[in-house]
């Protein structure tokens, strides 16, 4: 076979070194005959060993006989038949023999331990690599480790059951959102403070949260949803109060010191005598002030509670998400949501102009059919396991890509919408999510978006 060692590699004895053994005078003794037969048997059994340890046992003993010839005994020599060449007793070499022979030069081949280690690394599955990244972290280069984590999520996804539950998902979300650690006692302290200023609004929304989704209802209780939203409202309330106090200190200092920069900058600053009041439930319906609760936060919070293993994990992830990734979505005027709706129409016109023109001819703008999808990051569209898979992608590469995901859902409905004289009825509720297809279409459309429009996508929710 091609991998078998050559005849020279087997260290067979040459004809010159065996000529003296075929001399009839040396073969006359029965003792010599038995010795040669034993040597032939040893040579046949040690054919593998010879390739690893240089000369075979037969070659070594024959060289010893050359140095110390055997003396012939008295009497007439017995006529024995000639001994056939030793090569006729050789068995056919197999691939295993060739593999063993290839390791004869240990200086140029890695040791067995290194070979086993390399084999383990090469056979590591994406699931094992993903789990190692989450449990052990990257080895040295953190940006490269995060990039590898995103690539694994995009190409292989997270291992989950039929209900969308994954043991690693909430931890991966916390990593991708760069969430700081939070002790459970801190969350419990917020719970013990009782109802927040937005408590009544929270209670009016929680019982409707994914009411028709049996998976969510089976795993997440309304009481858990109320506690988490109330704790988030307290945290946002404290942040607004702290900001207002800092602004009040600046205004008071400018009044006392008579700072011309601050006094002449604005009449409001010049004549203000008191620090601004904190926005309450009755006053957060409009304006650009950050609110503590807006309608739709209950649906946006639902996937966090479903995927997390505790309320404290869901709380810190949800609070981080709405304050860092999409603060414009939870302000009183929800200006980030309205900017996102404008971008849905703009991106659809760029990527699918024919469908965009048809919807516009029917007076169908994103303000009519896409408000809930923009506000909730498509969490309002079942099934929930597909929502979780889509969020894995959004948290990996940016929540701003949700705008393109909505456009991708419209493209998947293109034929039905174009054939319908009244697409309004079809767009009242989107068809079930298909996360994998939506992600593929989104990745294809990213290349078509101009740089200035993409910059708007990135910053529209801030």
Image (spheres, grey):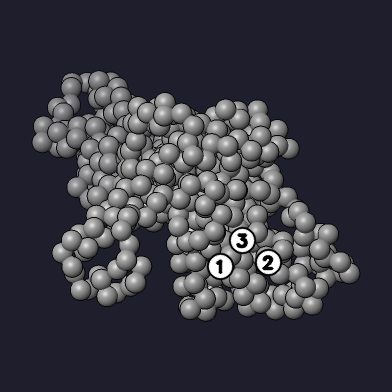
Q: Give me the C-alpha separation between circle 3 and circle 1.
A: 16 Å
Please identify the quarter of the rendering in which residue 22 is found: top left
SS class, disc 2: helix
Can you say whether 429 is above or below 422 in the image?
Answer: above
Q: How crowded is mark 2: few (under 14 residues within 10 Å), some or many (20 or more)?
A: many
**For marks 2 and 1 on the same chain, the one whose residue lies earlier in the sequence:** 1
444 vs 322, nearest the viewer: 322
- Judge from the rendering whether residue 215 lies leftward or rightward of residue 173; answer left or right: right
Label drawn at residue 3 = none
417 vs 62, nearest the viewer: 417
- Judge from the rendering whether residue 69 lies leftward or rightward of residue 332; answer left or right: left
Residue 67, x across and y down, in percent: 10, 36
**For marks 2 and 3 on the same chain, the one whose residue lies earlier in the sequence:** 2
Q: Give me the C-alpha separation between circle 2 and circle 3.
A: 13 Å
143 vs 95, nearest the viewer: 143
Question: For the point 72% across and 61% down, which residue is it?
Answer: 369
- Judge from the rendering whether residue 126 lies leftward or rightward of residue 263; answer left or right: right
Residue 60, x across and y down, in percent: 19, 35
Q: Is residue 33 visible?
A: no
Question: For the point 66% across and 48% down, which residue is it?
Answer: 380
Question: For the point 36% across and 47% down, which residue is it?
Answer: 241
Residue 31, x across and y down, in percent: 25, 20
Identify residue for label 1.
339
Identify residue for label 2.
366
């Amino acid at each position: 076979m091609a991998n078998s060692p050559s005849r020279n590699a087997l260290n067979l004895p040459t004809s010159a070194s065996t000529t003296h053994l075929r001399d009839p005078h040396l073969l006359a003794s029965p003792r010599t005959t038995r010795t040669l037969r034993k040597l032939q048997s040893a040579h046949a059994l040690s054919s593998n060993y010879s390739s690893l340890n240089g000369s075979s046992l037969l070659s070594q003993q024959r060289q010893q006989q050359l140095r110390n010839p055997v003396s012939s005994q008295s009497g007439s020599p017995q006529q024995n038949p000639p001994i056939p060449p030793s090569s006729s007793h050789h068995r056919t070499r197999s691939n295993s023999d060739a593999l063993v022979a290839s390791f004869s030069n240990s200086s140029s081949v890695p040791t067995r331990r290194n070979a086993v280690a390399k084999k383990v690394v090469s056979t590591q599955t994406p699931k094992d690599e993903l789990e190692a990244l989450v449990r052990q972290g990257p080895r040295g280069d953190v940006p490269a480790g995060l990039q590898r984590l995103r690539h694994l999520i995009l190409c292989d996804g997270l291992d989950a059951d039929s209900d969308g539950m994954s043991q690693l998902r909430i931890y991966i979300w916390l990593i991708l959102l760069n969430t700081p650690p939070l002790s459970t006692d801190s969350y419990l302290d917020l719970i013990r403070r009782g109802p927040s200023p937005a408590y009544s609004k929270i209670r009016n929304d929680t019982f409707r949260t994914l009411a028709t989704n049996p998976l969510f209802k089976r795993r997440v209780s309304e009481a858990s949803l109320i506690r988490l939203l109330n704790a988030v409202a307290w945290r946002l309330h404290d942040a607004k109060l702290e900001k207002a106090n800092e602004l009040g200190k600046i205004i008071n200092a400018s009044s006392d010191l008579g700072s011309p920069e601050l006094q002449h900058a604005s009449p409001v600053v010049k004549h203000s005598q008191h620090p601004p009041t904190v926005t309450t439930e009755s006053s957060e319906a409009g304006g650009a002030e950050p609110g503590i609760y807006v309608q739709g936060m209950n649906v946006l919070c639902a996937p966090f509670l479903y995927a997390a293993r505790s309320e404290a994990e869901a709380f810190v992830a949800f609070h981080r998400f709405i304050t860092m990734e999409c603060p414009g979505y939870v302000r009183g005027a929800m200006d980030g949501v309205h900017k996102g709706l404008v971008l849905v129409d703009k991106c659809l016109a760029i990527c699918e102009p024919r469908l965009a023109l048809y919807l516009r001819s029917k007076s169908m703008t994103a303000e009519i059919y896409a408000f809930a999808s923009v506000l909730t990051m498509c969490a309002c569209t079942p099934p929930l396991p597909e929502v979780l898979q889509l969020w894995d992608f959004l948290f990996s590469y940016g929540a701003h890509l949700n705008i393109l995901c909505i456009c991708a859902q419209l493209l998947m409905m293109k034929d039905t919408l174009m054939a319908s004289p009244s697409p309004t009825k079809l767009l009242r509720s989107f068809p079930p999510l298909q996360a994998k297809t939506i992600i593929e279409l989104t990745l294809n459309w990213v290349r078509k978006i101009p740089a200035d429009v993409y910059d708007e996508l990135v910053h529209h929710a801030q």
